[in-house]
């Protein structure tokens, strides 16, 4: 008997959110179990080789890493959210990794202790977003059809817009008009809105207050 897949999650993790969005877009029945990453249960450490979320449990078998989980969900729940052209598909996979690098810049920005560090990471993010600006076709990354690249980029965009909303600090420069339009479109999707817990914004703001001495002074 096949059981519903279960995603092991942390409420604020952007990588988990990638897989939740994909599950919702694919309309895959699933369960989510939240854990505290600062106090990881022993059972979780036994099934997660890297000790990180997300972890997807399917009939007692385990997958880890969001990109791998999303590929599995895409292959087992057609139609595919990848482009049909082989090069376009490979390029999308490459840019999923690129967006992962932007999430690292974002993490460093969101935990900045001082203005100098914050501004440096803000510049790194803007440079990365400038590269995306050259490729986005709108309304989604590849044009009319939603893709795994979109489900993987949405968590970053969600967090950028929330920091802008709660601090007044602009993280998407005015000249990146495609990125701004793309961010507003993707974050308005039901699958993205429902991919986080109901109190996500307050939890996220609380995280920023705790982790960033600089942003804590700017939060409204």
Image (cartoon, grey):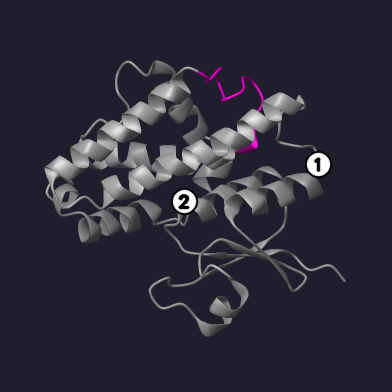
For this view, does 184 lie left or right of residue 190?
left
**For mark 1, what is the residue?**
78
Do we see residue 146 in this rendering?
no
As drawn, 30 above or below 23: below
Of labels 2 and 1, earlier in sequence is 2
Q: Position of residue 69 (x, y in %)?
A: 66, 54
Q: Determine the residue positioned at 44% across, 20% down.
A: 133
Q: Quadrant of residue 183?
A: top left
Q: Position of residue 211 (x, y in %)?
A: 24, 59
Instruction: Tell me the element at label 1.
Output: loop
Q: Which mark is residue 27?
A: none
Q: Quadrant of residue 163?
A: top left
**For mark 2, what is the residue?**
14
For this view, does 24 lie left or right of residue 133?
right
As drawn, 190 above or below 177: below
Residue bounds of the magenta highlight: 135-148
Pick the front one: 204 or 119: 119
Q: Determine the residue positioned at 44% across, 23% down.
A: 131
187 inside magenta stretch: no
Instruction: Tell me the element at label 2.
Output: helix
């Amino acid at each position: 008997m096949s059981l519903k897949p279960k995603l092991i999650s942390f409420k604020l993790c952007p990588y988990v959110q990638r897989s939740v969005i994909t599950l919702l877009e694919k309309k895959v029945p699933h369960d989510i179990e939240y854990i505290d990453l600062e106090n990881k249960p022993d059972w979780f450490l036994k099934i997660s080789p890297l000790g990180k979320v997300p972890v997807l449990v399917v009939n007692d078998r385990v997958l880890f890493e969001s990109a791998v989980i999303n590929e599995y969900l895409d292959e087992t729940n057609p139609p595919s959210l990848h482009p049909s052209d082989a090069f376009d598909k490979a390029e999308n996979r490459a840019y999923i990794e690129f967006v992962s690098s932007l999430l690292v810049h974002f993490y460093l920005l969101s935990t900045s202790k001082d203005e100098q560090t914050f501004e440096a990471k803000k510049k790194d993010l803007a440079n990365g977003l400038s590269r995306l600006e050259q490729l986005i076709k709108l309304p989604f990354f590849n044009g009319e059809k939603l893709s795994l690249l979109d489900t993987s980029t949405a968590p970053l965009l969600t967090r950028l817009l929330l920091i802008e909303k709660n601090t007044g600090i602009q993280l998407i420069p005015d000249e990146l008009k495609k990125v701004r339009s793309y961010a507003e479109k993707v974050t308005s999707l039901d699958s993205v809105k429902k991919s986080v817990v109901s109190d996500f914004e307050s939890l996220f703001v609380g995280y920023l207050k705790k982790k960033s001495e600089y942003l804590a002074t700017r939060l409204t």
